[in-house]
Amino acid sequence: MRSRPEVISVPWCPFCGMDVGRPTYGTQRKMLEFPTGTCECGAVYVAEATGHNIGAAMVECLVSACNDQWELAWELDPEEDYLTGRIEDYDEVTHQVVPTRNIDGRAVRGVLYFVRLNQEPAELVKRYEQKTAAPPADSRRETVRPPGKETGSKTGQSGEKKQKKLKADKKLVRELAQQADIDALVDLYFDDRRVLRYLQRLLYEPDPDVRYRTAWVIGRVSGRVADHEPGAIADLLHRLFAACADSAATSWGMLETIGAVIAARPDIYGAFTRHLYSYMGDPARREAVLWGLGEIADAKPELIRTIPFYSLFPVLNHPNPVLRGLTLRMLGRIRAKEAGFQIMGLQHDTTPITIYEKGEPLNTTVADLSAEASEIIHKENANDQ
């Protein structure tokens, strides 16, 4: 688990799992300022070198995430508007995480504190302005609310501690996954963190119907869990990628699950999209990659446009009709008018195929997917005119 490394390592973001750069001071220095940085996923972090001034670091990190708008920062609600996390044992001198808390005889006590807004700052500002347009005379706050609970809270999704915790086992998790009971799986996870690992083991199944259903279920569960423990889902993604990179192990369902998890929370894990795309070079994994990219395209099309999606156009002429269909599905969802003519050229391809939507098999044809993609693109073009 990256949350507690055994060796010295580069600091990472507790939300998306990506390595983060060394925090730096701004061009305009301020009193009590901490060095800050920004992750690719949008999280803002500050470094507190001593470990004794975390409170001030928390405040500055939240304010920095709000573009230095203090009034807005105090109006935000923890978990609803932003998530927090921290990486301990951070050495500001070498920009490393040192689990032994000692390097070359020097004590290491630093902390990296992270804040990630759940909405774009502009949306939060608009909501704040509407809320304060005509405030009552006695409604001003006289006290400052500190930032909320950090990532990894041991409470359930409702935020209230449960009286009796349930214990997960393989049989129970399998039954809930087969029933696609997302609510029950999420509740069970907050009682027993082994749920995600049990779900991952269900992917080792030769039946594609089971694999795709399980991948979709894991994506839905992960999206809900990420509201409170984004770091746990980042760890899951790293395990899935590690399994895909192991040539000695089967990667059934892994890439599909990665796509489903990113699609469930593209705002947090969107940076992993380009790593998923990198597996397009493996012929045996193209179907899984294209399905995952299609799921992401449905949730946040602009993420697909950050990868070289033009290189996927030739797949429209691939001899495998499933690959043609999945490519049509993805290009339609990102409204790729650049491929409009190639897409229309497949409207007479009546080859029957089976793809998966929300974990269930869908019998369709390449022609139907071509017509659907063309309709979306033409509708978008009409709206632009």
Image: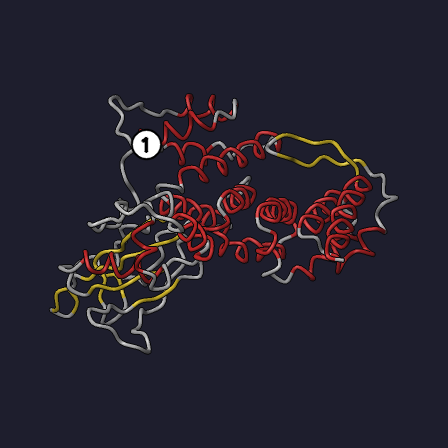
Q: How is the image coloured?
A: secondary structure
Task: Please provide percent x and percent y for residue 133.
Answer: 40, 51
Q: 4 above or below 167?
A: below
Is the residue 212 above or below the residue 91 in the image? above
Q: Residue furthest front?
A: 137
Which amino acid does the dot numbered 1 rest on?
Gly
- Which quadrant: the C terminus? bottom right
Residue 62 left/right relative to 179: left
Q: Position of residue 220 (x, y in %)?
A: 49, 36
Residue 247 spot, x, y in % from top left: 51, 50
Residue, far right: 348
Q: Tell me residue 65's x, y (percent).
A: 36, 59
Q: Residues within 10 Å of mark 1 (few under 14, many from 20)?
A: some
Which of the pair 198/373 is nearer the observer?
A: 373
Camera-side residue: 310 or 143? 143
Against 156, is 42 above or below?
Answer: below
Residue under label 1: 156
Judge left or right: residue 286 versus residue 260. Answer: right
Could you say which quadrant of the image residue 31 lies in?
bottom left
- Residue located 60% across and 33% down the image: 358
Q: Is residue 269 left or right of residue 101?
A: right
What residue appears at the point 58 percent right and 35 percent down from the top-left corner? Answer: 212
